[in-house]
């Protein structure tokens, strides 16, 4: 018998039992739909992380304090706080460096009149807007004089403006209170939107880092140094010279490990995509498990079906069906069930994905290779879990099958 | 022309725990083309066992069987399936039609396995349904038909591959007298007008009376084999 004829026999048998066929498919449908939705959200998130990393400015190099994982090796240093604004000034003098800004961040309550809001207050240098390519919406940014005098001036992100000045008045010239000290708002930032991690980048207040260190953190160190290389091909040499300079300034000699990390966007992007790859692997695991569960459902029902249709099988054998033909027919039934289940699952998953992205505004994307993989895997599940029931059917003795009540 | 069925010293034994059931103890029978053999005998005498062997659904413990001139004892399961599909037609007491499937599609089933083309299948199936007088029910499902009508669909199904032998094991066992007569008249006509060779098991003398030769089984042996005087005349 041809494959086409076998498939038609299988489809005819499935149509004869529509309700049961649909219920049998359900496991695969739900499994595939769940996989499609999670993959769509995962891949969407990964893509937007990538995009927002790129939007940070491609020449950005970030220096952060080193981790303290090496037990006892560097007990002289206080873990994470070793970077100073002076390190930043020294880096700024290196060739190939366009600009440097320290970053001293603190989450704190900010008050304006009757309104208050918990936000991240970042102490940065006047070069910060250049490094982040972040334009102003109104007013001005602070300058070297403000920095030198640790002036109590602030530039507000869009979300903070909305929270503290909800009536629509221009905040420029108004006063906000940070940790008891009055700061004059001198400008506002253009909106940037969400970062790839789902963070609201506009939920921020920028002040001179000198003011932040003296009035807010009380520390001599900062959370990070942002370095902008003069051009893309300067990223690697600058990364190397920054590392060398800081090792020298921090008196680090070989076997000691660096108390800082210098990372450029390439390495951050790599980490992000590694995280994404692990996530996709986990999803693949979830996919496999749910499809296996769906497959066991198919095997279950197919076994019931073989028992119920014992007389039918006996009859088919009596009128000339070979054992191999019976086997192929039942195998075809489970493969058709699983594959159609997979296809319905993809459609359901696509609809679910659409619903999720409409409801949550999360970015989503369904990669075509996952669609192909879902269909192929569903069909394989059908073969694997359909084989045993099909063999049971093919091994029936026609006389006993015909006599079966 | 070779005999349709030629069995010699056919024996069938079933092991039942430590006992052995001798269902057939040495059966000899020759059926020539065009014969209509009615098989009778008490319950448990081995009639169905014999029909299963003749129908190549089972293999005997001992003995030889030539079907249409060829020895079939040593054939593989696939070869026996092919002969069943192409040269034999079965009619069962329980009709054994596929549920939720039209009469036409039920009749087409043996042709699917024999590889007949789709266009031919429908034409042949309709022709056979017409032969048994229910062409108008071609699109009905079994649960929309009476027992007699269902059995006629089953007869049409047995006819589609132009078999050399039709085997019917108590085909009227589940039917009322009127339907039994209708069905038996169809068998008679197939035998007389189309020369179809038929072997039919029954408990009822009225039904056996349609046969032109009556074979009687008792305890796994043929104890009677006679021409039906009323019909032969
Ligand atoms: N699969 C089997 N296993 C064991 N014994 C069997 C089997 N099939 C038939 N027998 C036995 O073989 C004998 C003949 O059975 P068979 O079915 O051929 O009788 P029958 O003449 O058709 O009877 P009935 O008129 O009741 O249909 C019986 O004793 C029966 O119990
Ligand atoms: Mg019997």
Image (cartoon, coloured by chain):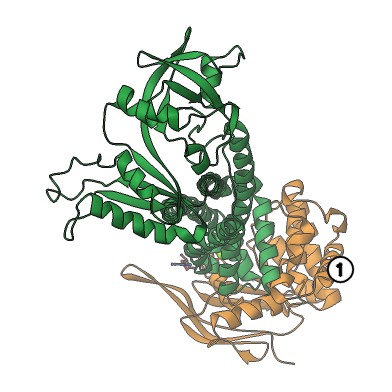
Which residue is depicted at the point 42% across and 17% down?
A: A110
Q: Is residue B39 left or right of residue A238?
A: right
For the N terminus of chain B, the image quarter is bottom right
Q: Nearer the viewer, residue A38 or A121?
A: A121
Q: Chain of mark 1?
A: B
Which residue is depicted at the point 26% across and 33% down?
A: A220
Secondary structure of residue under mark 1: helix
Give the labeled residue for mark 1. B123
Q: Position of residue A143 (x, y in %)?
A: 47, 31
Q: Is residue B2 left or right of residue A348?
A: right
Residue B80 vs A281, above or below: the answer is: below
Q: How many marks?
A: 1
Name the tint of chain A in the rendering: green
For the C terminus of chain B, the image quarter is bottom right
Q: Position of residue A171 (x, y in %)?
A: 56, 17
Ligand 2: quadrant of the figure: bottom right
Q: Quadrant of residue A166?
A: top right
Name the tint of chain B in the rendering: orange
Extreme-top residue of the structure: A114
Which residue is depicted at the point 68% across and 52% down?
A: A15
């Amino acid at each position: 018998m041809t494959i086409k004829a076998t498939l038609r026999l299988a489809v005819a048998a499935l149509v004869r039992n529509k309700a049961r066929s649909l219920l049998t498919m359900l496991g695969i449908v739900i499994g595939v739909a769940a996989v499609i939705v999670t993959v769509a959200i995962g891949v969407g998130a990964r893509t937007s992380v990538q995009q927002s990393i790129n939007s940070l400015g491609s020449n950005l190099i970030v220096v952060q304090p080193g981790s303290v994982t090496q037990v006892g090796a560097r007990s002289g240093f206080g873990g994470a706080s070793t970077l100073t604004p002076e390190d930043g000034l020294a880096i700024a003098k290196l060739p190939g460096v366009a600009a440097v800004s320290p970053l001293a961040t603190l989450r704190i309550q900010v008050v304006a009149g009757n309104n208050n809001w918990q936000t991240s207050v970042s102490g940065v240098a006047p070069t910060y807007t250049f490094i982040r390519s972040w334009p102003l919406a109104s007013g001005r940014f602070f300058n070297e004089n403000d920095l030198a005098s640790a002036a109590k001036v602030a530039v507000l992100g869009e979300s903070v403006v909305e929270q503290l000045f909800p009536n629509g008045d221009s905040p420029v010239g108004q006063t906000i209170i940070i940790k008891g000290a009055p700061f004059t708002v001198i400008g506002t930032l253009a909106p940037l939107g969400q970062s790839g991690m789902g963070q609201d980048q506009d939920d921020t207040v920028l002040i001179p880092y000198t003011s932040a260190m003296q009035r807010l953190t009380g520390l001599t160190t900062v959370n990070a140094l942002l370095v902008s290389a003069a051009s893309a091909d300067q990223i690697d040499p600058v990364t190397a010279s920054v590392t060398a300079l800081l090792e020298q300034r921090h008196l680090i000699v070989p076997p000691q490990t660096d108390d800082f990390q210098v990372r450029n966007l390439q390495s951050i992007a790599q980490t992000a995509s590694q995280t994404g790859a692990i996530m996709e692997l986990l999803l693949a695991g979830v996919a496999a498990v749910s499809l296996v569960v769906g497959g066991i459902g198919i095997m279950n029902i197919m076994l019931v079906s073989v028992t119920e249709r014992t007389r039918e099988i006996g009859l088919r054998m009596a009128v000339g069906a070979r054992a191999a033909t019976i086997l192929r027919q039942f195998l075809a039934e489970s493969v058709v069930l699983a594959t159609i289940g997979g296809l319905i699952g993809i459609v359901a998953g696509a609809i679910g994905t659409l619903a999720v992205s409409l409801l949550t505004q999360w970015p989503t994307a369904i990669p075509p290779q996952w669609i192909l993989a879902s269909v192929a895997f569903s069909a394989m599940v059908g073969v694997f879990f359909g084989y045993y029931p099909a063999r049971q059917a093919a091994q029936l003795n026609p006389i006993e099958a015909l006599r079966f009540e | 022309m070779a005999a349709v069925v030629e069995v010699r010293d056919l024996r069938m034994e079933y092991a039942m725990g430590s006992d052995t059931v001798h269902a057939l103890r040495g059966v000899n029978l020759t059926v020539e083309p065009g014969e209509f053999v009615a098989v009778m005998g008490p319950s448990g005498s081995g009639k169905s066992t014999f029909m299963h062997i003749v129908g190549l659904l089972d293999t005997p413990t001992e003995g030889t069987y030539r079907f249409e001139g060829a020895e079939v004892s040593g054939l593989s399961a696939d070869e026996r399936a092919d002969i069943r599909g192409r040269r034999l037609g079965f009619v069962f007491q329980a009709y054994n039609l596929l549920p939720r499937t039209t009469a036409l599609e039920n009749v087409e089933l043996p042709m699917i396995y024999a590889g007949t083309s789709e266009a031919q299948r429908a034409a042949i199936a309709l022709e056979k349904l017409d032969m048994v007088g229910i062409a108008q029910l071609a699109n009905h499902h079994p649960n929309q038909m009476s027992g007699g009508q269902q059995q006629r669909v089953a007869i049409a199904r047995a006819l589609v591959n132009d078999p050399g032998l039709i085997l019917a094991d108590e085909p009227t066992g589940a039917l009322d007298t009127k339907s039994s007569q209708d069905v038996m008249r169809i068998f008679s006509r197939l035998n007389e007008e189309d020369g179809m060779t038929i072997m039919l098991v029954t408990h009822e003398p009225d039904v056996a009376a349609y046969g032109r030769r009556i074979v009687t089984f008792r305890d796994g042996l043929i104890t009677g084999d006679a021409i039906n005087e009323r019909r032969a005349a």
